């Protein structure tokens, strides 16, 4: 047996991307629950004359949830 036969074979390299970190759905769910409570709790329902205000709430909530998702994923 030759000394070169005793070497460990090279580890094959993979071109597969590294795994993405897992996303914590429970953490986001808790954040969304708190956000919805604090944003919508003072509202009176129904609010037919305040359509623009409701649209603004929806937009704000959507943007804040998206920011939280991106921030926790990085």
Image: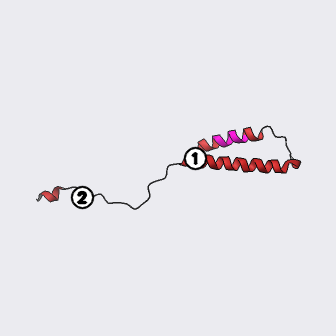
Between marks 2 and 1 in the image, the one whose residue lies nearer the viewer = 1
Residue at image location 59% in from the left, 46% down from the top: 25
* Residue 23 visible, this orientation: no
The quadrant where residue 16 appears: bottom left
Q: Nearer the viewer, residue 26 or 32?
A: 32
- Furthest residue to the bottom? 15
Label 2, residues with CA under 10 Å away: few <14, some 14-19, many ≥20: few
Q: Is residue 17 left or right of residue 50?
A: left
Residue at image location 77% in from the left, 49% down from the top: 56
Label 1, residues with CA under 10 Å away: few <14, some 14-19, many ≥20: few
User: Residue 66 at what x, y percent from top left?
Assistant: 64, 50
User: Residue 68 at what x, y percent from top left?
Assistant: 61, 46
Q: Secondary structure at mark 2?
A: loop
Stretch of the chain drawn in magenta: 30-36
Q: Is residue 10 left or right of residue 42?
A: left
Q: Tell me whether the residue at label 2 lies in contact with that at label 1, contact meaning CB atoms closer than 8 angstroms.
A: no
Real-space Cα distance between discs 2 and 1? 41 Å
Q: Secondary structure at mark 1?
A: helix
Q: Nearer the viewer, residue 4 or 71?
A: 71
Q: Which mark is residue 9?
A: 2
* Residue 20 visible, this orientation: yes
Q: Which mark is residue 71?
A: 1
User: Residue 41 at what x, y percent from top left?
Assistant: 78, 38
Residue at image location 76% in from the left, 47% down from the top: 57
Q: Which of the marked residues, 2 or 1, is nearer the chain's N terminus?
A: 2
Q: Nearer the viewer, residue 3 or 68?
A: 68
Which color scheme did the rendering employ for the protein?
Answer: secondary structure
> Is-magenta flag for residue 12?
no
> Is-magenta flag for residue 32?
yes
């Amino acid at each position: 047996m030759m000394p070169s036969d005793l070497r460990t074979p090279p580890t094959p390299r993979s071109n597969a991307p590294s795994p993405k970190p897992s996303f914590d759905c429970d953490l986001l769910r808790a954040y969304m629950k708190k956000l919805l409570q604090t944003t919508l709790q003072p509202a009176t329902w129904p609010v037919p004359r305040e359509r623009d205000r409701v649209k603004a709430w929806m937009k704000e909530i959507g943007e804040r949830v998206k920011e939280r998702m991106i921030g926790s994923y990085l």
